[in-house]
Image (tube, rainbow, N blue to C red):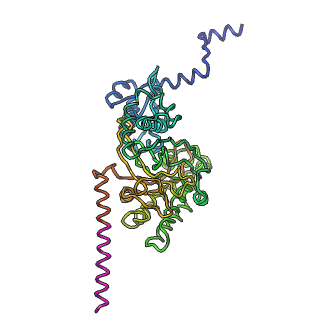
Amino acid sequence: MLRKFVRQLRPTQEKYVAPVLKVQNFFESYSFYPKSEKEIKNTLSDFPSENVQDILKLFTFLKSKDETPINIDLKIPDKINVSRDLNDFYNIDDIKSGASLNTIKIKFGNGSGNTGNEAPKPKGADWESLITHQYNNILGNEKADTSAFQQAQKFYPKYTESATLTAKSFSKFASTPMTQYGGGGGKKNLSSFWIEKGGTNGTPKTDMYTKQYNISLKKKGGSQLASGSKGETLAMYSAALEYLGGDKSGLDEIKEIQKEIEDNFIKISTKYTKTQLADMSDKSKKNLSAKDRKDVEQFIETEAFHKELNEKIKLHLNFEKNPEFMNFLIYEAMSGSKKFSLQQARASVCVEFDAKTGAISKFIPITKDGKKKFGNVPNISAEIIAYASKAKVYSAWKSSKGSPFSSFRISSRFGEKEKETLQSIIKEVIRKEVIRKNIREKVRELEALFYKY
């Protein structure tokens, strides 16, 4: 009898949906992949206007990195997926602040744009497999790396042309079989020096290698050379200092910055992101729990420290003031020469490619000739010196889903805002060095003249 009345109150019975199908349906709903602002405005005309404005800002901020940087569920106006491929360039907080988002929530997710037999979109490691396979194919031995060969098959024929184009560029400087480096992270890769200095991230710099080259592969558009937490920062910094040696001008200021990082870099254990803590710091703390209040106060204090440290960094960690240290810092950030005990994990050349066309956009020897020769005192390439002359070094928060931490970032400004070629930058570095040399010679001539009389 009771069941009858319950059914009258809720006459429609729910159908059972298996958990797997529920998950599948959730992912399949993110199926709108906009390619233009116009497409967003037309398709999302039923969305709240403030959400559409945020989505437009998000798309505009990310579109230079990916043709379809976001995907959207047309039934959910306030939650947007950002392509996982962009995780190479940004964390969630970087995107929120860079796009000045106000209403929508974002997370990394690839949605469900691929259906039927269409090839999936390659991620970073997939591109390594594709390029390795096609490079070996050009050499006449496509199964030289069987694992890369098998992994690449799922992306054909859609990505055959772009992978082949990139592989042809690789074959211009290398002529022996290529292997995708499958070494995972972990302390087993790290040198005792790195562990002793506090470093823990064992992810190799090398993505693929040949007989002479250890290759670090990057997608076009990235400018971050380093973005490390306290331990990684101190280890990298210590490596550059060890290359530099003692009795150098500016050494006291460089070591002072190192001490500041050691004493003041923190991680806040909280469910909140950096952006959320910043918002909470602008509001009354009366309604916060004791734990949240303490976290916000710690955030405010460390935020002030980051700004003070950045002023010291501007004065002392620049190419004009300390060129040798900057050269070694960029070299270590890109090569991992002191970081890894395994030579195979150290990168000797960095190649940046355009995932849309397959063309190589930058070829950057890290060692002088790009070959895997890592000495105690590195022979650094002219290209790395050019990067060091343009690098921006600063401290900032880093977080994605919570627990923000202090990070030391090295961002290459080369190619981002200035209309300069790598050749022009190298010439400028050489010009400055010639000026320095001429000045030193003139000083010696004047000194000799002085003592003569």
Residue sticking out furthest to the bottom? 453
Question: In this rendering, would 7 be left or right of 179?
Answer: right
Q: Is residue 53 visible?
A: no
Tell me residue 252's x, y (percent): 48, 71
Of 161 and 56, the residue lying toward us: 161
Q: Locate the C terminus and report the quarter of the image it occupies.
A: bottom left
As drawn, is 7 to the left or to the right of 110?
right
Residue sitting nearer the eye, 246 or 113: 246
Q: Quadrant of the rendered structure where residue 45 is? A: top left
Query: For the view shown, which residue lies furthest in the right direction?
Result: 1
Q: Which x, y percent locates residue 27?
A: 51, 26
Quick check: is 443 in the magenta stretch?
yes
452 and 402: which one is in front? 452
Residue at coordinates 57% horizontally, 56% vertically from top-left? Answer: 231
What are the residue bounds of the magenta stretch? 433-453
Across and down, in percent, residue 49 comes to 37, 30
Q: How many marks?
A: 0
Q: Is residue 313 left or right of residue 272?
A: left
Q: Quadrant of the N terminus?
A: top right
| Residue 213, percent from left and from top | 45, 49
Q: Is residue 117 above or below residue 124?
A: above
Camera sees residue 78: yes
Residue drawn at (36%, 47%) of the image: 362
Residue 110 colored in magenta in the image: no
* Dominant secondary structure of the residues highlighted in magenta in the image: helix
Relative to 374, residue 277 above or below: above
Quick check: 150 above or below 268? above
